[in-house]
Amino acid sequence: MNVACVGAGPAGLFFSILMKERDSAHEITVLERSQAGVTQGWGVVFWDDLLDEVRAVDPETASAIAKHAFRWSGERLLVADHDPVVLGVPGYAIGRRRLLDLLLERARSLGVRIRFEAEVAHPADLHDADLIAVCDGANSRLRHVLRAPLGTRVHTGSNKYVWLGTTKVFDDFTFAFVETSAGWIWCHAYCFDGETSTFIVECSTPTWSMLGFDRVGEGETLARLEGLFESHLEGHPLRADAGTRWRSFRTITNESWQHANVVLLGDAAHTTHFTIGSGTKLALEDAIALTEVQDGRPLRSALEDYERQRKAALRPWQTDARFSARWFEDVPRYAELDPTRFFGLMHERRSPLLPRCPPRLYYGLHRATHDVAALRQLRRWAAPKIKALC
Ligand SMILES: Cc1cc2nc3c(=O)[nH]c(=O)nc-3n(C[C@H](O)[C@H](O)[C@H](O)COP(=O)(O)OP(=O)(O)OC[C@H]3O[C@@H](n4cnc5c(N)ncnc54)[C@H](O)[C@@H]3O)c2cc1C
């Protein structure tokens, strides 16, 4: 089979690896618009479940990721001048550049052809391909061309965020909330390589414009953020990479994930808000599923099966992501609580009950039960009823 993967992100590279492993006779080319070594974004988080899934299909890639991952030890919440609240929930992070280099090396070693500075504008440019795997990310150009048959929908979140890096090593996954005269602004910060940390800053759009971020360039933005987060950065600078700017998160869904011989994977097919830290995992899972459905039967039925399976698997993540994004859009609703309650409810942010229940009452219930399973049961029971009312 002649396969063209558009985009050398996690979805495109991992799909090329798995297809080549499955059958070395496949002709596989990955086409990437950027130059080699250029990517956007800093570190991404993941947990053991991702390593397990990758290990099951490609142990070599799993051990390379594990070897280069940074293990953060817990979560830390800092609200204004209050004492920190710490929770011992560990996880991993890896630099996006490092992850892509590992996948590139693996793909090349298996005989995948990689072409950089090869932007694809239209599926017709790839007329020789039996299968076109569209892995060109959230702003997918190919998906845009096919938006009518694919039924693409975009929902834009109301907060602003910017994805930065810093040399300050945050050993814990740190949420620091700073109160300004214009409202709350906060960071999600974690180390990903022992030397560098991701530093995502988020706030409401009114706060963003009242702080003047709609009117200043990159240098001034970094300087103002360094000032606002001075006590957390302890003198370390913030860094931006090429193309960094404030954005509003775009949640992408598609009614159909395939059209003729074109199929969507990763962010091109679906995005989930960054506050659930799962986009890379879901992109890799798409690659695994799309490889596994191709067991010699006609392409059409394989693609339909892939779409069915992945849509079902995605649904709970998309719901979680929607409620998580909403929690961060409602920060003033929770920020008046003491930090322990605030953190407790941040951990409950995927709950469909929480936005409909007074925060203190919800927290009281949470504490009273002392039994997370019971609350989950209540949530499972109530969620469909609440959704039906929405
Ligand atoms: C602020 C932020 C934080 C995040 N944090 C996490 C996290 O902690 N954990 C996690 O799992 N996920 C995280 N994510 C999500 C994660 O980055 C994405 O879900 C993941 O990168 C999707 O992989 P992909 O391969 O589908 O797309 P991408 O990684 O976006 O790759 C797409 C590739 O296609 C290329 N391309 C684009 N257009 C074309 C074209 N026309 N022709 C050729 N090439 C093209 C691009 O240059 C790019 O290399 C975060 C996202 C954001 C915005």
Image: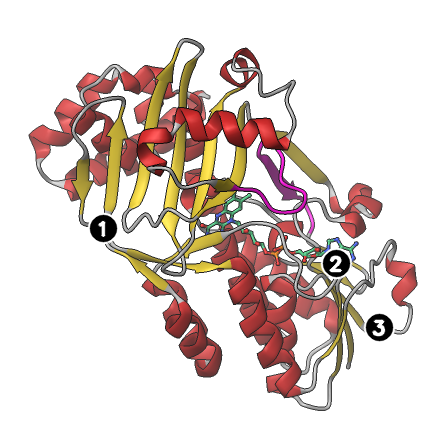
Q: Which element is circle 3 on?
A: loop
- Reading the image, the residue beneath label 2 is 34
Closer to the camera: disc 2 or disc 1? 2
Q: Count the marks: how many?
A: 3
Q: Is residue 369 visible?
A: yes
- Work out which quarter of the rendered image holds the N terminus and state it: bottom right
Q: Tell me residue 150's x, y (percent).
A: 75, 47
How packed mark 1 is, by other alpha carbons closer than 10 Å (few <14, some 14-19, many 20 or more), is: few
Vertical side of 134 occupied by 27: above or below: below
Q: Tell me residue 112's x, y (percent).
A: 70, 81
Which of 211/115 is in front?
Answer: 211
Q: Which element is circle 2 on?
A: loop
Q: Residue at x 8, y 37 (%)?
A: 370
Distance Cα–Cα, label 3 vs label 1: 45 Å
Type of the residue with mark 1:
Val
Distance Cα–Cα, label 3 vs label 2: 21 Å
- Reading the image, the residue beneath label 3 is 129
Q: Which mark is residue 89?
A: 1
Q: Residue at x 63, y 35 (%)?
A: 245
Type of the residue with mark 2:
Ser
Q: Are marks 3 and 1 in contact (CB under 8 Å)?
A: no
